[in-house]
DNA sequence: AACTCGGGGAT
DNA sequence: ATCCCAGAGTT
């Protein structure tokens, strides 16, 4: 694995050009359930704005979420921000240097802690991400869905037993080699077994079962949800509402939600203290998540000016030229960019 | 153990 | 349309 990595691994990714634990940590969080190519531009922008853990800790959460907007899994950004404040507060700016301590921070689990500790501090800690799971399931012929507890325990034991315990270089490189093999050779769809250094004694390969392992996640029906929202605009601004900190799109700004059984006019009364009329239903936006599908029904009303009076908390009139700096969910951003009358 | 949490790339 | 990606936290 290590010899293969030297000649065939990925060595040019932005977060591989440093051993700064802050940068490595940021990359690992962004890379959770997110592909490398998607992460790169977000990683660069984020570091430009927050070059170190102190600048991140000092920033308002809204600014952090704005930079995370479009990347998904926003709890990652909230946890990242909280962890930065812990490092700069309780830990007095001293970044944790062991996987055990790292795993105490919010958003850092066993695998992410191991990845940071092995890469930055040469700690012999095993990782177990999607790549490693796939490689191990195929190479050892592991049956059962890897998300199942017994299967995952078995995989962790294998990963631990394979992790080099001596030799700084081997300790550092082995987890990288596992991930690179999984990402470039032992891929989900059509693995390039002809180029794989493990193919000579890979159980799946020898049995011609590369396509069957790892066992796929059990299928589940995807429910459909409906959501009516207010699209209240003036010539140059739109009304946004901050979402609750937990749940879908936590902490991001979105269009004000019309509650079940409520009309757009009633919602405008609740939000602005004025019962507005003349809302027009815009085309429904369909957005698919991993575990449900959402139909968004936008009720649009153009106003001559921003209404005066007391606004409900969490509301903000936002100019269109400010939208780039606001944390908006990707589908809402698309909705606002879509031309209307 | 099951569920929640996004957006997009790959097929 | 479907699966899953450098998973973690909550219930």
Image (cartoon, coloured by chain):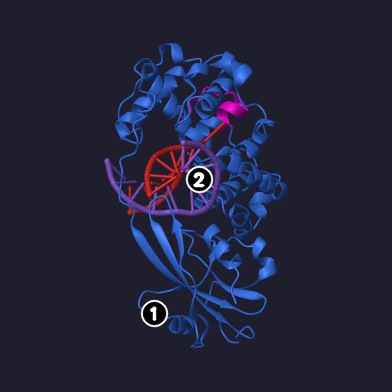
Chain colours: A blue, B purple, C red
Q: Quadrant of the C terminus of chain A?
A: bottom right
* In magenta segment, residue A145: no
Residue A174 located left or right of residue A13: left
**In front of the other: A123 or A65:** A65
Task: Give the structural element (helix, strand or loop) at label 2.
Answer: loop
* In magenta segment, residue A120: yes
Report the residue marked by disc 1. Answer: A262
Task: Give the structural element (helix, strand or loop) at label 1.
Answer: loop
Residue A309 rendering spot, x and y as whole percentages:
58, 87
Q: Residue at x 49, y 59 (%)?
A: A250
Distance of label 1 from label 2 (alpha carbons): 38 Å
Q: Residue A180 appears in which quarter of the rendering?
A: top right
Q: Residue at x 58, y 38 (%)?
A: A36
Residue A223 located left or right of residue A321: left
Question: Where A324 sits versus A311, above or below?
Answer: above
**In front of the other: A105 or A25:** A25
**In front of the other: A73 or A75:** A73
Question: Where A220 sits versus A325, above or below?
Answer: above
Q: Residue at x 34, y 38 (%)?
A: A217
Q: Which residues are magenta?
A: A116-128
On the same chain, marks 1 and 2? The answer is yes
- Give the residue furthest to the top: A200
Give the total of numbered labels: 2
Report the residue marked by disc 2. Answer: A106
Residue A199 located left or right of residue A78: left
Subunit of label 2: A
Residue A110 rendering spot, x and y as whole percentages:
46, 34
Residue B9 rendering spot, x and y as whole percentages:
55, 41
Residue A164 located left or right of residue A294: right
Subunit of label 1: A
Question: Where A63 sits versus A277, above or below?
Answer: above
Q: Is residue A163 visible?
A: yes
């Amino acid at each position: 694995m290590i010899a293969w990595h030297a000649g065939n691994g990925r060595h040019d990714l932005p977060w591989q050009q440093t051993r700064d634990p802050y940068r490595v940590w940021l990359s690992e969080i962004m890379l959770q359930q997110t592909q490398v190519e998607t992460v790169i531009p977000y990683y660069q922008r984020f570091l430009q704005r927050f070059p170190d853990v102190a600048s991140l800790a000092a920033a308002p959460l809204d600014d952090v979420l704005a930079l995370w907007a479009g990347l998904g899994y926003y709890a990652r950004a909230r946890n990242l921000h909280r962890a930065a404040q812990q490092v700069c507060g309780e830990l007095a700016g001293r970044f944790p240097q062991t996987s055990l301590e790292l795993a105490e921070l919010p958003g850092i689990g066993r695998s992410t802690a191991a990845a940071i500790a092995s890469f930055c501090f040469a700690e012999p800690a095993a990782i177990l991400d999607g790549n490693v799971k796939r490689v191990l399931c195929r190479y050892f012929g592991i049956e059962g869905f890897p998300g199942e507890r017994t299967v995952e325990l078995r995989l962790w034991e294998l990963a631990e037993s394979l992790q080099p315990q001596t030799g700084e270089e081997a300790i550092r490189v082995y987890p990288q080699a596992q991930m690179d093999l999984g990402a470039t050779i032992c891929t989900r769809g059509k693995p390039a077994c002809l180029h794989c250094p493990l193919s000579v004694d890979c159980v799946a390969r020898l049995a011609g079962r590369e396509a069957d392992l790892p066992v796929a996640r059990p299928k589940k029906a995807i429910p459909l949800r409906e959501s009516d929202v207010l699209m209240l605009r003036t010539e140059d601004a739109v009304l946004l509402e901050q979402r609750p900190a937990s749940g879908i799109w936590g902490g991001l700004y979105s269009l004000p939600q019309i509650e079940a059984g409520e009309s757009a006019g009633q919602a405008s009364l609740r939000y602005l203290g004025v019962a507005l009329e003349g809302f027009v239903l815009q085309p429904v936006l369909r957005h698919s998540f991993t575990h449900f599908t959402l139909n968004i029904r936008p009720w649009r009303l153009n106003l001559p000016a921003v209404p005066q009076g007391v606004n409900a908390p969490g509301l903000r009139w936002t100019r269109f030229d400010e939208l780039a700096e606001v944390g908006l969910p990707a589908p809402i951003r698309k909705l606002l960019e879509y031309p209307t009358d």
